[in-house]
Amino acid sequence: MPQEILILGLNPAWQRLFFLDKFTPGEVHRITNVEEYASGKGINCSRVLQNLGGKPLLMHFLGSDHGSRIFDEISGCGIGQAPIWIKEPTRTCTTIACGGEATELIEPSPVLSDFENKDFAQTLGEYWNTAHCVALCGSFPGNFDVECINGLDFTGKRVFVDAIENIDSWLEKGVELLKINMHEYSKLLDRMGIPQVKSSPQFWKMTATAVLERLPIKNLVVTDEESPVRAFRLVEKKFQSATVTPPAVEVQNSVGAGDSFFAGWLYADSMGLEFEECLVKSTAVAVARCEVDKPWMLSLERVAELEETIRESLEQQE
């Protein structure tokens, strides 16, 4: 029986997905295929994790009609929820999928009231003490009281982070995983004052070592679309890295690939897989996600096939 993972996906969205054969800015497009569904990093992660065999419990802010639709949809697929209901509507994310590429139009996040922040703090307190695994996904709504999570006690917790803004306090306490993309990695390096000489062949080793020596992060993973996925850690103060190359596939919709990667790592970790195997499985899950329209439609058989291919590309360095 998999252990329940508390997913803090605090900034969900109602997804509108348009499929076009050709997209040209400034022209009129008649759309023949439109799909709508619950989305956002926490939701995508939870649905993929459930598909893999994990047991997510999703906490998120929900408002107005879109919030109600999200609650009903997530309840209908059997995922446990701890919603915090807010006055402002849940944002809409509109994605135009065309030729394997996606253009995203994301509405502003809702702005929380002081009462809604207090409601969140109370609700989180009801689950925090019994949660052993916690995953933080994505951004926060407007006016979110970051201090209410910065002061949490991590004792006995295994914490995983897929975020970059306002998470320094969590990183300083120590996390199992920080998963970010290349753009976010550059922002983290800037914040930490670590030089970025990307032309240097030692760029990755120098920067990742500096991050891991300053912050108690057990595993650091950096993704970069079709480029190699890189994972780093310190074992007894010795630097280790592992790199895999995602295979080329026919992309249907790449939105949420990073969320699927995160879910893959959470599941692999819960199964007790080693560092390198966590990297292989999570990359396979992310690639399989890109081959289908919606994140939760990925095939477990396809994930297994991709794992074999990705494992062959594995490179390790100490």
Image (cartoon, rainbow, N blue to C red):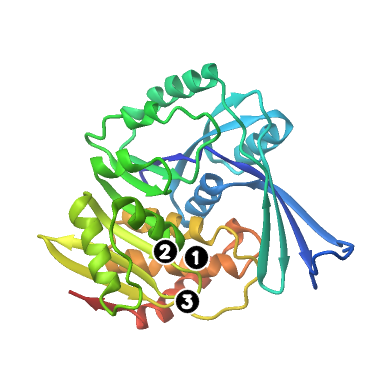
Q: Which residue occupies the foreground of this view, 258 or 105?
A: 105
Q: Are marks 2 and 3 in contact (CB under 8 Å)?
A: no
Residue highlighted by disc 3: 305
**Residue 317, located in which quarter of the rendered image?**
bottom left
What residue would you read off at disc 2? Answer: 282
Residue 91 seen from this side? yes
Q: Kindly identify the amino acid type of the residue bearing the numbered disc 3.
A: Glu
The answer to whether residue 314 is left or right of residue 237 is right
Percent of width and height locating residue 128: 35, 29
Distance from the alpha carbon under mark 1 to that under mark 3: 13 Å
- Measured as percent of width and height from the top left, residue 311 is found at 36, 78
Label 2 – label 3 distance at C-alpha? 13 Å
* Dot 1 and dot 3 residues touching (CB under 8 Å): no
Disc 1: CA contacts within 10 A as few (<14), some (14-19) or many (>=20): many
Check the picture and name the quadrant holding the C terminus: bottom left
Task: Residue at 58%, 56% (x, y): give it.
Answer: 296
| Three-letter code for the amino acid on which mark 1 is drawn | Ala
Residue type at tag 2: Ser
Which one is earlier in the sequence, the residue at label 2 or at label 3? Answer: 2
Please, is residue 202 above or below residue 129 in the view?
A: below
In this view of the protein, can residue 1 be seen by the observer? Answer: no
Marks 2/1: CA–CA distance: 6 Å
Q: Secondary structure at mark 2?
A: helix
Where on the picture, by quarter, is residue 13? top right
Give the residue number, with chain letter if any, for mark 1: 286
The label on residue 41 is none
